[in-house]
Amino acid sequence: MPASGSKSVFKLAGIVTLGLVAGVASAYVSMKHFGMGSEERMGWSGSRVTGSSEAGPLLRARVALTGLLALNRSQAIYFTRKVDDLGEPLREGCHYRLSGGPLPGRWWSITAYAADDYLPQNTDDALSVDASEVRPDGAGAWEAEAGPVRNPAMPWLSTRKAGNFDLTLRIYNPSEQAQRDFGTIAFPRVERISCGEPQ
Amino acid sequence: MKPGLRYLLAFVAAAAIGHVGTIVVAPNAIMHLAMRKLSEDGKLINAFRFSDRTTSASRWVVRPSPDLAYASCVYDLSKGPILVDVPATPGGGYVSVSVFAGNTDNVAAMDSLRSPNGIRFILQKERRLVHPGDGPVIYTPTTRGIILDRRLAPTQAAFEIADKARRSDSCAPL
């Protein structure tokens, strides 16, 4: 093969390799951030096909990457948010008030996950707040706090060492209406109280 | 065709193949890795493995729930169906059993609300003859996959009760 032909083949092989790498990288970004077929309600997004065989290829891939072995919707429905009620990213250095009313299931919990999709690397023994910890008033309204330092007056979700995190709400044994229509769920609010100095 | 255009087309075609190929292959590849981890590199097949209480150090699956006690069984139906038996948690604690195929599909989910006295079933590969046996039969499209037993255990005390009960879980050949 002439030298120029050989050079051309090597150049083509290099470009194909670059293309493959770019394709794999774009697939990773899609799986990590897009295509969940999700619905967003009050800042929380969830998918009614997570874990089911109804899921398409991209959703299946995304579930495998970020929610492998998720329960199906008759057992639990999952909702995630990365921002507070004002649309600002959730950050370890801030305190947030979580508040809401009765949720349509037998039990619920809210957990913080770091950007790597694992639990924050702290030993505060406060990895979630759940239905058994909050103290609802007569109307069922409850409050909790998420932040890096405990507020003794409230059920606490520790975000220490979470960096920029997200919150996952799990509603176990959700009502059929909630499974069918996420719009019927009164989702918890996530209000930023302060950032920087511990409360 | 101009060399520049040829290279551009080659790049776009390769990127498309890489993108679609990754999305198609990812679920099976990630499940394969999970099965390898949960079976301790193939040593625990058709047997339950009991995870410690979830802490910030838990890394066996992404986004683990700190409120649940997990037990997992990597199944292999290449030699025939298996019998899965998951007893109830004393006191009526919530128990959920899910069967996942090797492509991540959740092919069955059962819980203690419908089966308060424990969950028991035969797991069989699709399009195989039903093996004689008692109880319901669940079909899965893949030979290998994962069965997950999740028990509500938001406190240390609840975890200890759930842990004691789950030690009687079994998933063994008929």
Image: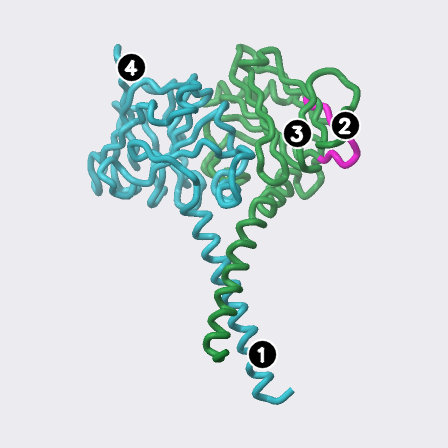
Chain colours: A cyan, B green
Q: Residues within 10 Å of mark 2 (few under 14, many from 20)?
A: some
Q: Chain of mark 2?
A: B
Residue B98 falls in image quadrant: top right
At x 60%, y 47%, the residue is: B29
Image position of B43 (left or right of A164): right
Label 3: state its secondary structure: strand
Q: Amino acid at mark 3?
A: Phe
Q: Position of residue B127 (x, y in %)?
A: 73, 32
Q: Compute the Cα span from label 1 to label 2.
A: 55 Å
Label 1: state its secondary structure: helix
Q: Compute the Cα span from label 3 to label 4.
A: 40 Å
Q: Chain of mark 4?
A: A
Q: Amino acid at mark 2?
A: Pro
Q: Nearer the viewer, mark 4 or mark 1?
A: 1
Callouts 2 and 3 in the same chain: yes
- The single residue placed furthest to the front in the displayed view is B1
Image position of B121 (left or right of B161): right
Q: Amino acid at mark 1?
A: Val
For residue A134, the mark is none
Q: Position of residue A185 (x, y in %)?
A: 34, 23
Q: Can you identify the residue that label 3 sits on? A: B48
Q: Amino acid at mark 4?
A: Gly
